[in-house]
Image: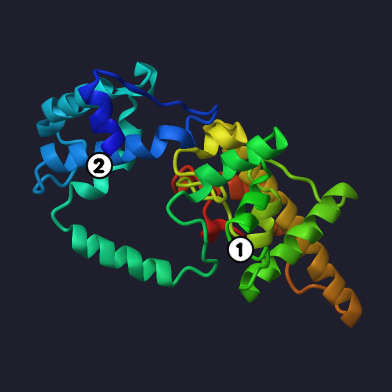
Amino acid sequence: MKRVHMARKRCERIEVTFDEKGQLEEKHGDELMSWIGVLAREHIPIWIQDWRSRDLDGLKEIIWKETVTSFTVDDCFRIEEDWVKFVQYRTFSQFQQLSNRGSKIRTNNEYSSKGGRDGYIKLDQEKFKQNGKWEKRYGLWLDSRTGLDGELKDPACKKISELITEYNTQESQGIFESVGTSVVLTQALSRLEHPGRIRGQSKFVKLSQYFNLNRSSSRDNDVQSMRREIEELKALVRGLYANKDVEPSFDQENVPTVDQHKSMCFKIGGRISNTAQT
């Protein structure tokens, strides 16, 4: 924080910049994050459990004024959600409990990242500087799990790397097609995208922003993915019965259609649910 205090004494402001994804860039981004953390510890009472509390309106304004006194920040980046991500974990009285729970979750992470504090933001920006274009998401995912020697040590990560290569080959041959959120990394991990953080991206990148989706198109893409899975399962079942020379015991004419499944999904909450898939 020495640089910040020296700049304040000289009545100067440190300029921070954001990339096109809205992420703080490396040069002074870390200093801004640390500064806001200091202000949060100084001004936010530890008994506050929710950053959205109306009791904090005046304190938030103090933090903002203190920040723009030391940093040149465009007012358009004054987004409450981003502020929450900077300081929310410092405003809970149960901080130690949350920290321990987070550590436990981390130990259960099947594909542990080696990105450290900088995470995907710095890695993404470094790749952009090197190549002049944004790295593919699966590339960032693999790079963040690669050691200093350039090798993937974790057997589970090696398996995902092989699957990514396989899906890339299939995509180049026209066998596999990336549609909506059903892309190479999603298929390799065999896990659907969730509404929270995007795999292989920083915490500030949203699902709709990265995949250029609105709510309805995201839902339609999930339905398309379900349609393909159902057709694949039907073909698999027919193949099994063909090998055994036995007719299916179920009435194929009465099997629910994809549109019927879609209607069922909307009725149970307006979203595609794993429990509604066949």
Residue 79 position by quadrant: top left
- Return the residue at label 1: 148
Residue at x-position 27% and y-position 67%:
100
Which residue has dot 2 on it?
37
Q: Nearer the viewer, residue 65 or 47?
A: 65
Q: Is residue 57 above or below residue 156?
A: above
Q: Which of pointers 2 and 1 lies earlier in the amino acid sequence?
A: 2
Q: Nearer the viewer, residue 159 or 114?
A: 114
Quarter placement of the N terminus: top left
- Is residue 17 among the parts visible in the rendering? yes
Tell me the crowding category of disc 1: few under 14, some 14 to 19, or many 20 or more residues within 10 angstroms, Cα based.
few
Measured as percent of width and height from the top left, residue 254 is found at 70, 58
Q: Are marks 2 and 1 in contact (CB under 8 Å)?
A: no
Viewer-closest of 198 and 245: 198
Which element carries disc 1, helix, strand or loop? loop
Residue in view at x 28 percent, y 25 percent: 7
Q: Residues within 10 Å of mark 2 (few under 14, many from 20)?
A: some
Residue in the picture at 58% in, 56% down: 144
The mark found on residue 24 in the picture is none
Q: Quadrant of the C terminus?
A: bottom right
Q: Secondary structure at mark 2?
A: helix
Q: Quadrant of residue 276?
A: bottom right
Q: Position of residue 206 (x, y in %)?
A: 49, 38
Q: Nearer the viewer, mark 2 or mark 1?
A: 1
Could you tell me how far apart the alpha carbons at marks 2 and 1 are, in whole angstroms? Answer: 30 Å
**Which residue is at the front of the view, 263 or 275?**
275
Outermost residue toward the bottom in this view: 244
Q: Amino acid at mark 2?
A: Gly
Coordinates of residue 3 in the picture (x, y in percent): 30, 34
Whether residue 256 can be seen here: no
